[in-house]
Image: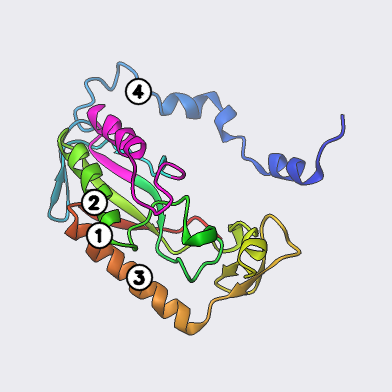
């Protein structure tokens, strides 16, 4: 059976630490650790108290919002269900604030499959409903603010918008190396910084406890 060279390179690159039985056993929640007092005890983060040490990792909101970026009922129900399950701190998936800067995150017609917090007060109302639903079960909420996708952005923007994807510097696109990701100008970088600051301020204004920066993408 023929194997894709690139896929095989990625597979061979993976670590194998998880095959070590000793390492796996060290991370198990066995009866020796019961009753897990520390895990279920409150923790203070600056001026905020979280009811326990359980944190939901950032995920779950891409393609679960309206095309305008407003959290829809499905997205709200998704996060509220996690709060109902008892998690102390919920962190959303990435929320880009680089529309008009990173060409790969905006769809045709200035729509997006990413939730937004930089568009209008109508969008804010969806976040307020999400926060209120989670707060009803004692959970705190942080929004993950993203500067964009960089070199791992969808190169489809070259066809849809006749614009190249962007990155911090001149880089080949991850999916199509033949497509260059153009470097951001100083003006766009300053605008991006301002957008992040404004998003943080708006987040607090709509009743969400905090933000953190998404630094995964290219």
Magenta residue check for 1: no
Badge 2 density bin: few <14, some 14–19, many ≥20, Cα 10 Å: some
**Mark carried by residue 121:** 1
Task: Answer with mark 3 or mark 1, whichever residue precedes in sequence.
Answer: 1
**Label pair 4/2, CB-CB below 8 angstroms:** no
Q: Secondary structure at mark 3?
A: helix
Labels 4, 3: front one: 3
For the residues labelled 4 and 2, the Cα–Cα distance comes to 40 Å
Badge 4 density bin: few <14, some 14–19, many ≥20, Cα 10 Å: few
Q: Note whether 115 is above or below 190 in the view shown.
A: above
For the residues labelled 2 and 1, the Cα–Cα distance comes to 6 Å
Q: Which residue is mark 2?
A: 125
Judged from this view, the residue extending furthest toward the front is 109
Q: Looking at the image, what colour scheme do you see?
A: rainbow
Provide residue 102's location: percent of width, then percent of height. Answer: 52, 67
Q: Over which residues does the magenta segment extend?
A: 62-91
Labels 3, 1: front one: 1
**Mark carried by residue 29:** 4
Task: Answer with mark 4 or mark 3, whichever residue precedes in sequence.
Answer: 4
Labels 4, 2: front one: 2
Magenta residue check for 86: yes
For the residues labelled 3 and 2, the Cα–Cα distance comes to 19 Å
């Amino acid at each position: 059976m023929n194997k894709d060279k690139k896929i095989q390179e990625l597979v061979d690159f993976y670590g194998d630490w998880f095959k070590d039985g000793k390492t796996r056993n060290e991370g198990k929640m066995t009866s020796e650790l019961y009753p897990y007092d520390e895990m279920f005890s409150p923790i203070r983060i600056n001026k905020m108290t979280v009811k326990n040490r359980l944190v939901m990792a950032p995920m779950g909101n891409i393609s679960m919002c309206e095309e305008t970026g407003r959290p829809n009922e499905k997205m709200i129900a998704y996060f509220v269900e996690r709060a109902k399950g008892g998690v102390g701190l919920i962190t959303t998936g990435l929320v880009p604030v680089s529309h008009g800067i990173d060409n790969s995150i905006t769809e045709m017609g200035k729509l997006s499959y990413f939730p937004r917090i930089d568009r209008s007060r109508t969008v804010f109302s969806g976040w307020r409903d999400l926060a209120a639903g989670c707060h009803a079960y004692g959970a705190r909420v942080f929004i993950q603010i993203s500067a964009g996708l960089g070199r791992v952005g969808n190169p489809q923007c070259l066809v849809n918008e006749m614009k190249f994807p962007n990155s911090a510097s001149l880089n080949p696109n991850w999916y199509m190396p033949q497509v260059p990701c153009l470097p951001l100008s100083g003006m766009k970088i300053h605008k991006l910084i301002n957008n992040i600051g404004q998003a943080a301020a708006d987040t607090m204004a709509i009743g969400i406890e905090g933000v953190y920066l998404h630094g995964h993408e290219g």
